[in-house]
Image (cartoon, grey):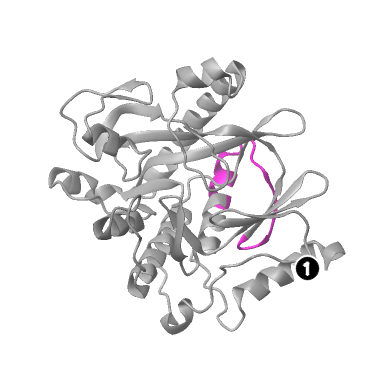
Amino acid sequence: MAKQTGNAHQLDNLLIDAEYPELPGFSRNKVRDTYQLPDRRRLLIATDRQSAFDVVLAAVPYKGQVLTQIARYWFDETKDICPNHVISYPDPNVVMAKDLDMLPIEIVVRSYLTGSTNTSIWPMYERGERMIYGHKFPDGLKKNQKLSKSIITPTTKPPQGGHDAPITEFEILETQLVTTEQWHEIKEKSLALFARGQELAATKGLILVDTKYEFGLDENGVVVVADEIHTPDSSRFWIAETYQRSFEAGEEPNSLDKEFLRLWVVSQCDPYNDPIPVIPDDTLREFSNKYVALYEQLTGLKFEIPETSIPVRERVRSALALELSEYF
């Protein structure tokens, strides 16, 4: 794990706002600030904002950089399975991407009975549901148990500020949210991407538990994977060597992903009905350490701690001014 020095100012040099008035087509998502550029290009800037339960909770040191660099690793490792949206990386937090016609569903692939959000399969199972996302589950399963095979549990993509909602394959095909041909293609590609992710993660001592994919169509109608892939925001990663012992003891697995923060929130309140308390600085630093550790364990590279004397926002702006000099 990277030794994170300079704790006193880790939380003072965060990229919370990446809105630059020189650039056109600005929009803000929970984590990324994006820009619509000419010639079917889209600029995505991963900030340090941290979301869970469909709200922004805090800002986390190095979060945006880790997300961008882990996604970069996985895009490179899976481009033979499915083309991706990447054009270039102007900055450690920034992706210049193809602007796609996004498909209106998210594909979640799962190999374990786990989760803490309303769209996760464990809370549904714990409530007594046995037909979940169109899949039949037997009685007697335990939290964090491995499933007999990987399954797809899609959700709708809501308008800004809305909540993801579970949907079944039957409902997707019945309503033609995507065409039958598109559905079968993204389903096949999702399972192939997930299998590659599990295979490579296993060689690094990790279990890729589940993940989310988003797909769009390029100018030629080709299916392209977009947004992010196999990051700790969109996936669960467990430490392989301690999983079985934790499972048998009825304990949460050692993880390097967003679930750490979700579980902290759930231990403090009902995040869907109660105000979420302020997250302590030490908890945010511990969370940051997990993301950095995942990057290093997956890639085998040392995480490059940003220069603390330069505000991240200024560094990103300088990189954008070089990449898009016509606007600056």
- Which residue is identified by label 1? 321
The answer to whether 167 appears left or right of 22 in the picture is left
Is 62 included in the stretch rendered in magenta? no
The percent position of residue 108, horizontal first and vertical second, equals: 45, 35
Closer to us: 26 or 270 = 270
The percent position of residue 311, horizontal first and vertical second, equals: 61, 78
Is 76 included in the stretch rendered in magenta? yes
Q: Residue at x 53, y 72 (%)?
A: 14
Closer to us: 179 or 320 = 179
Say which element carries label 1. helix
Q: Residue at x 37, y 48 (%)?
A: 237
Rendered view: 308 above or below 84 = below
Number of marks: 1
Q: Residue at x 15, y 46 (%)?
A: 250
The percent position of residue 162, horizontal first and vertical second, equals: 51, 44
The answer to whether 112 appears left or right of 246 in the picture is right
The percent position of residue 82, horizontal first and vertical second, equals: 60, 33
Residue type, numbered disc 1: Ala
Mark 1 packing: few (<14 Cα in 10 Å), some, or many (20+)? some
The answer to whether 213 appears left or right of 209 in the picture is right
Please provide the residue range marked out in magenta: 72-93
Which residue occupies the extreme right position in the image? 326
Q: Can residue 82 be seen at all in this image of the molecule?
A: no
Q: Name the quadrant of the N terminus.
A: bottom left
Q: Can residue 223 be seen at all in this image of the molecule?
A: yes
Rendered view: 245 above or below 307 = above
Q: Name the quadrant of the C terminus.
A: bottom right
